Amino acid sequence: MANIVDLSTEDKLEYQFFPVSSGSVSFKVRTPNDAHIALTMGPQPSDPMIEIFLGGWGNTKSVIRKNRTKPDKVEIETPNILNGGEFRGFWVRWDSGIISAGREGEAIPFLSWADPEPFPIAFFGVCTGWGATGSWKIEDGAEFNTPDQLEYKFGPVLSGSLRFEYRGPHNCHVALTPAPAEVDPMYEIMLGGWENTKSVIRYCRQKPDKVEVPTPGIMNPNQFRQFLIEWKCGRVIVRDGESGMVIMEWVDPSPFGITHFVPPSAPVAAPLYAAPPGYPGAMGGFSAPVMAGPGNWVDASAGQIPPGAVVGGQDCSGEPLYVARAQHEGALIPGKLCASHGCAYVPWGGLEHGKPQYQVLVGGPNNWVRTNGSNVPPNAFPGGQSEDGEPLFVGRVNHEGSLTTGKVQQSHGVCYISFAGQELGFPDYEILMH
């Protein structure tokens, strides 16, 4: 779910901050040089702070700096990366201390650095200086992953519309409120409720619903669906995000000022990993290698490769990728170890997540069988489990010159891999067998 903010920055090197709700932000900027981005814990330029300078030194190079202290952590030549006459698009991501920046439309970052002392990033600031003013279009890159819990998380809304994508079997609930809290008055939009058969608009959590329309099959557990909610002078309109077709609308006779949206969200504390069948002795955490039939899962970190690690594929550069797994959001997720990056990567929630602590499959099978969809063979090698207890298997996919290992989730009918910052799903894949 994204929210776009338009703003201008003067030639003052004074940051303007806004809150972020996930580990990424996308933006477009029009400036001749020195587009500066800050990642902080609070809405002010205080340590700890990561700064990314794009097009500095006369639009010739870009750097990552921490706590306003030289030497810079990363410095690369980027001649003419910015333009004072046109908007240029970029993205910034952070996960487990790995900070990266890339161009719009390019999945591979041109700047990346692993912070050995990461901190929780809650705000994103922008500024210009050194003779430059700037115009920005900033999109909070939050992706809200919603378990089966109606718990709300709030984000600011700075315009009269909200465009978002949702992937799930049913029950996408979005609320519009006058404050960052679950308070009345409140509009609730429920899409794909009642087992994905109908959608409604509700006011102040009261029945009867103001609008009810049949929408059979509007949601899909394997595919993102786009939606647009608009409001003006009390008129609330819900549209299909791709076609623009009106799904439902209602006019409130006593409208209120909407300042925040409320999507369902996961609780802050993720549950501890509980070992699935076939993992004797597995306690929450990585205290010891875990047996899974032939082969061990062995603790490792920071790019370490245990002796006898199973090679599952190779990166675009030709570097071997090892079968690995790591904990994330209460799940134990199969993925890939890229040793030169100093971490393993696992796919979850539409994004690639770097994990400096992980487990590597050692001495295990290396027998891969082609399959597709939900056709998981009986002898498939288990690699972990999802946050809600579903077994996850080890799969791999050929993609853009790589052979990348990831997770097979049978209920979704795909193999997910992490690739260039994203989680990508493929219905045709290879699966690791005993």
Image (tube, rainbow, N blue to C red):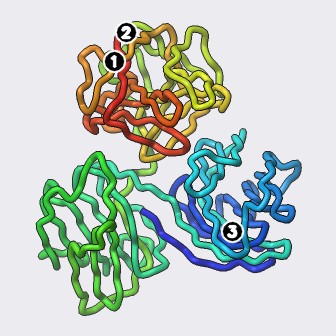
Horizontal relation, residue 1 to residue 307: left or right: left
Horizontal relation, residue 234 to residue 404: left or right: left
> What type is the residue that disc 2 sits on?
Gly
Q: Residue at x 42, y 30 (%)?
A: 397
Question: On the image, which quarter does residue 183 sit in?
Answer: bottom left
> What type is the residue that disc 1 sits on?
Val
Q: CA distance from mark 3 to mark 1?
A: 49 Å
Judged from the image, the secondary structure of the residue bearing numbered disc 1 is strand
Q: Nearer the viewer, mark 1 or mark 2?
A: 1
Q: Position of residue 331 (x, y in %)?
A: 41, 35
Q: Position of residue 432 (x, y in %)?
A: 38, 18
Q: Position of residue 234 (x, y in %)?
A: 30, 88
Q: Position of residue 75 (x, y in %)?
A: 81, 48
Judged from the image, the secondary structure of the residue bearing numbered disc 2 is loop
**What is the number of the mark on residue 293?**
2
Residue topped by disc 3? 126
Question: On the image, which quarter does residue 96 sit in?
Answer: top right
Q: Earlier in the sequence, mark 2 or mark 3?
A: 3
**What is the number of the mark on residue 301?**
none
**What is the number of the mark on residue 369?**
1
Q: How many marks?
A: 3
**Residue sitting nearer the eye, 18 or 72:** 72
Horizontal relation, residue 396 to residue 132: left or right: left
Task: Sort mark 1 into few (<14), some (14-19) or many (20+) by Cα contacts within 10 Å.
Answer: some
In the image, residue 47 sits, relative to residue 107, either above or below, namely: below
**Residue sitting nearer the eye, 249 or 18:** 249
> What type is the residue that disc 3 sits on?
Val
Q: Earlier in the sequence, mark 1 or mark 2?
A: 2
Q: CA distance from mark 2 to mark 3?
A: 52 Å
